[in-house]
Image: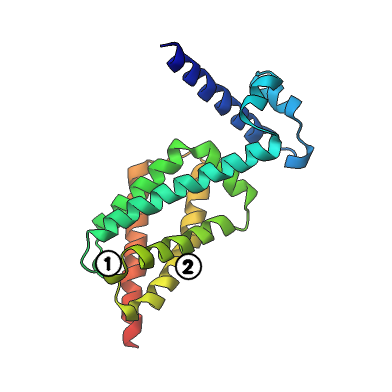
């Protein structure tokens, strides 16, 4: 019982430390923030901070690492949905909805972290790289699900929707994810379906 209480206390302390960094970086760059400021904002002592992080840069790195772990979970889920198809060029709106809903649910559950990461990457470079990793994962893990002639077409589609999806999610985060998750997932599913199915016809030109 004591161990569980300690785990909850540690999780709470880490959460407060991270959220304090999020808040402080709204007004100043990382290299201008001190451990004291974070501790004061989080209402923890310095020994608590150093029990989990070597310094502020280690804290920032661990947040970034967790972000990529969440992105990898999304990719793995999506690949699981794609793997059910005999040919992923025949995906339906329901398939896209399943992926989009899982993605949005993950973002909403970790919205402060996502806001933090997106704010640090105003060029959307992280999310665009996510699209590349997603596409390459499909090619590596389920190569037989995508016909050879469709690979360049699907690559363009991934590039296109990565930028659009990022803009939509960033706007959703600015509104504190107030728009219904299911409704937004449905909107994205139709968007994805239109892009991917529209691109299929380009190989006939």
Label at residue 88: 1
Q: Is residue 146 visible?
A: yes
Q: Is residue 25 above or below residue 184?
A: above
Q: Secondary structure at mark 1?
A: helix
Mark closest to the chain's N terminus, 2 or 1 = 1
Label at residue 159: 2
Please tell me how many numbered marks the rendered image carries. Answer: 2
Decide: few, some or many residues near mark 2? Use Cα within 10 Å; few <14, some 14-19, many ≥20.
some
Residue located at (52% from left, 55% from top): 167
State the separation of the CA atoms marked 2 and 1. 17 Å
Residue located at (51% from left, 48% from top): 68
Task: Give the left or right position of residue 87, taking residue 23 as reference.
Answer: left
Find out whether the residues at labels 2 and 1 contact each other: C-beta distance under 8 Å.
no
Residue 178 in the image: x percent, y percent? 44, 38
Can you tell which quarter of the image residue 134 is in? Answer: bottom left
Q: Which one is in front, 107 or 187?
A: 107
Q: Where is the N terminus found, in terms of image quarters?
A: top left
Can you tell which quarter of the image residue 193 is in? Answer: bottom left
Label at residue 182: none
Q: Nearer the viewer, mark 2 or mark 1?
A: 1
Residue 156 in the image: x percent, y percent? 44, 73
Residue 2 in the image: x percent, y percent? 45, 11
Task: Give the left or right position of residue 176, taking residue 85 as reference.
Answer: right
Name, please, the residue furthest toward the bottom: 205
Residue located at (60% from left, 31% from top): 19
Residue 114 in the image: x percent, y percent? 53, 43
Q: Secondary structure at mark 2?
A: helix
């Amino acid at each position: 019982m004591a161990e569980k209480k300690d785990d909850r206390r540690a999780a709470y302390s880490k959460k407060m430390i991270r959220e304090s960094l999020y808040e402080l970086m709204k007004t100043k760059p990382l290299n201008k923030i001190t451990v004291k400021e974070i501790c004061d904002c989080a209402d923890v002592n310095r020994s608590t901070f150093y029990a989990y992080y070597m310094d502020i840069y280690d804290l920032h790195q661990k947040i970034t690492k967790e972000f990529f772990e969440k992105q990898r979970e999304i990719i793995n889920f999506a690949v699981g949905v794609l793997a059910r198809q005999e040919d992923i060029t025949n995906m339906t709106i329901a398939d896209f909805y399943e992926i989009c809903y899982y993605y949005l649910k993950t973002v909403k559950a970790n919205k402060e972290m996502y806001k933090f990461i997106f704010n640090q990457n105003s060029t959307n470079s992280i999310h665009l790289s996510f699209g590349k990793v997603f596409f390459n994962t499909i090619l590596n893990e389920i190569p037989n699900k995508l016909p050879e002639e469709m690979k360049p077409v699907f690559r363009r589609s991934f590039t296109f929707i990565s930028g659009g999806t990022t803009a939509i999610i960033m706007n959703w985060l600015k509104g504190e994810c107030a728009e219904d998750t299911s409704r937004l997932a449905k909107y994205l599913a139709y968007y994805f379906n239109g892009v991917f199915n529209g691109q299929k016809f380009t190989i006939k030109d």
